[in-house]
Image (cartoon, rainbow, N blue to C red):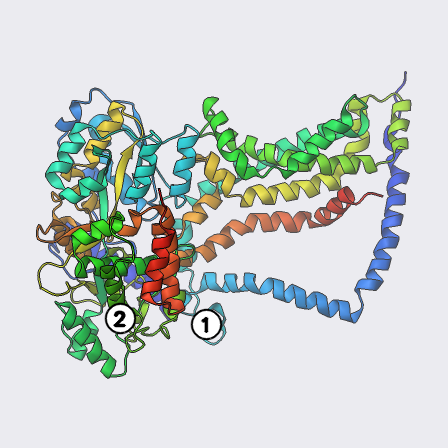
Amino acid sequence: MTTTTPVMAPVPMQDRATGRAGRRAASAKTKLSSPAASIIAIVIAVLWTVPTLGLLITSFRPELDIRQSGWWTFFTDPQVTLFNYNEVLYGGSTNFASLFVNSLVITLPAVVIPISLALLAAYAFAWIDFPGRNILFVAVFSLQVVPIQVTLIPLLTLYVDAGLAGSFWTIWLSHSIFALPLAIFLLHNFMKDIPASLVEAARMDGAGHVKIFFSVLLPLLTPAIAAFGVFQFLWVWNDLLVALTFAGGAPDVVPLTVRVAELAGTRGSDWYLLAPGAFIAMILPLVVFLALQRYFVRGLLAGSVKG
Amino acid sequence: MNVRARGFRSATLGGGLVAAMVLAGCGANDSGGSTGGSGGDTADAADLSIDCAPYEEFGDLEGETVSVYTSIVDPEDQPQIDSYVPFEECTGVDVQYEGSREFEAQLVVRIQSGNAPDIAFIPQPGLLQTLVGTGAVSPAPEQVEANVDEYWDESWKGYGSVDGTFYAAPLGANAKSFVWYSPSAFEDAGYEVPETWDDMIALSDEIAATGAKPWCAGIGSGEATGWPATDWLEDVVLRTAGPDVYDQWVNHEIPFNDPQIVEALNTVGDILRNPEYVNGGLGEVQSIASTEFGDAGLPILDGSCWMHRQASFYQANWPEGTEVGPDGDVFAFPLPPIGDAGAPPVLGGGEFTTAFNDDPATQAFQTYLSSPEWANIKAQVSGPGWVSANTGLDPENLVSPIDQLAAELFQDPEAVFRFDGSDLMPGEIGTGELWTQLTEWIANDKPSQAVLTDVENAWPTS
């Protein structure tokens, strides 16, 4: 059989999707751009940003000012220092740069592993008909209700028995385990959204599962993958509990969050360092979120609301 | 950068110069005091050596590792790590240090999942007792016991023992019975440091008569709000009722609301709930409950408060550049005894070296930590804010005058030492009901009798 061109199919699909989305966007635009809605949006945005602004201002104020007065006094008595940032970055016995690297080393596999596995699983649940598919899917879906706290000690016991304790593997595996149910659910719904005729057309042209997955579905799934990627990235980057529990006994593998949690010192006397610490830890997720936010909103809606 | 930022920089520079001079041996016996916070003049651990003989009996330990898990984190952790260097050089053991502020919760998780460290420094004898109950703790080797018998007050050994078996040697310590004040302000106003409780009350009245508030206090501490008030109560019980009653009270051999305890709480109330006395620079009596303990003493610096009762470790809370010393910006005097004069009793806390296995390397390291050699090396590499109750410790090795004072109190054979009672009581009380009730006692003016009765009723029955 000669080669076929299944990649042609998505093009009209995408056009239709944009057309529909375009109409929706237009109607939403008229609704949301009324003056009242704008004022409400601005008020909410300001209220929402005030605490972050306060934190930012606090991070630049001298220690004694932070401890004796609120950040708003900055406007009447502006005192600025970079001492706090200097202390956070270079004052401790642990190197902040290596912690930054640790956080990256933890986060990237902890995002890639669950997405790769979930894509394959979601494809199987959506497009391969096998016995017990629905029951299995409900089982995976219902795993989301298990709180991760109850799994901490049993999971750590398994890692210790397997000799994995103290390596990055414990953290990678744990984050993957905790992320998979939601990832499979979201990506499955998104895949189901793609019209069956598209997949059938590809199949008629002789494409197998692998070809359909890579050539037909993957290009269409980019927003969903990006959305879940951002979601998982933020979750793993900001995580303290999992890292604290599973990296226990291995100071070489702890991420940034563990260090930030300890900035305040043994008896909390250095808590003025928390604000600059928080801002340093926030930089990378902020960049990632701003760069990918359009996927974030679109992808989440696409996955959860069918039709 | 503004003036203030430059002030910080020159202060650091000055501190560095002093350190350099002391290290060069020019400024020996410099007693001008040290600055608050980190820094200060410390020795380099690599230059200090110890006698290796005591560790040879544990065999060849070359290449072994010992993991240490503690609640001591940055910046206090570096001196700990430095102080292990001579031991590592002697034995070839690699000591891996890990500190966490979540120590108490994580230690239990790690023990339960089979990932226990070799050694943990446990700050509460109550937690030690719980862990011994799980069977995870190994008794201390005889070398450690010999060291503790020789160099520590008997009461310390008792706190490291459970049911007559000695498990954990004391490590660091802190003295809580201190009242912080400003020597320069006292001198300007012509006040004397009080030596008896009556003098202290007379001084408070004298200050109150000028319209100022003599005391400042704060018991806020997140979910642990209330603990500084328990220290007040324990300190006064130790003074009005004596150490024997104190032990009975802590062990619940007398009711929690015994009349002697009510009397002690009322004595505390004469200061903490007296609107004439508190809360200097911070507000009304109720503001004690909402002020963070770490910030409560700061009004002393600007003269709106005169006295603040808090432990020796409070020196880390003074802002960078504050001079701590008998002639400096701030210093502390021991909380005076009540009634017949004598050495003031000392309330304190500390960590205990607890081992979770009996490997030779672990035991050798335990022995090192219980030795006076370690205490002196630790003192030399530490900045302000560290002291041990080891009587082999030479106070001259300590950097900060307040640490020296604390060490002298610990080593004074006349002074009665008692461990912080709320760390010895069952967790529901010592780190729960007592905090809550004393916070209500301040915030809602709840009567002393009712407060203590409610704690008594909450005491676990078993």
- How many numbered markers are drawn? 2
Chain ID, mark 2? B
Q: Is residue B266 visible?
A: yes
Local crowd size for mark 1, using a 10 Å CA cut-off: few (<14), some (14–19), many (≥20): few
**Vertical placement of B277 versus A107: above or below?**
below
Amino acid of disc 1:
Pro
The answer for how far apart the CA atoms under marks 1 and 2 are is: 37 Å
Whether residues under marks 1 and 2 lie with C-beta atoms below 8 angstroms apart, the answer is no
Query: Looking at the image, which residue sits at the far top?
Result: A1
- Give the residue at mark 2: B271
**Vertical placement of B243 versus A66: above or below?**
above
The foreground one among B453 and B59 is B453
Assign a secondary structure to mark 2.
helix
Residue B113 percent coordinates (x, y): 44, 30
Image depth: mark 1 or mark 2 in front: 2
Amino acid of disc 2:
Ile
Quadrant of res A307 = top right
Residue B354 percent coordinates (x, y): 28, 35
Residue B257 percent coordinates (x, y): 29, 58
Query: Looking at the image, which residue sits at the far bottom?
Result: B210
The quadrant the N terminus of chain A occupies is top right
Residue B270 percent coordinates (x, y): 26, 71
Q: Residue at x 49, y 43 (%)?
A: A100
Chain ID, mark 1? A
Local crowd size for mark 2, using a 10 Å CA cut-off: few (<14), some (14–19), many (≥20): some
Q: Is residue B434 visible?
A: no
The foreground one among A304 and A81 is A304
Q: Residue at x 30, y 76 (%)?
A: B304
In the rendered structure, the answer to whether residue A180 lies left or right of residue B229 reads right
Q: Which mark is residue A78?
A: 1
Assign a secondary structure to mark 1.
loop
Q: Residue at x 12, y 40 (%)?
A: B151
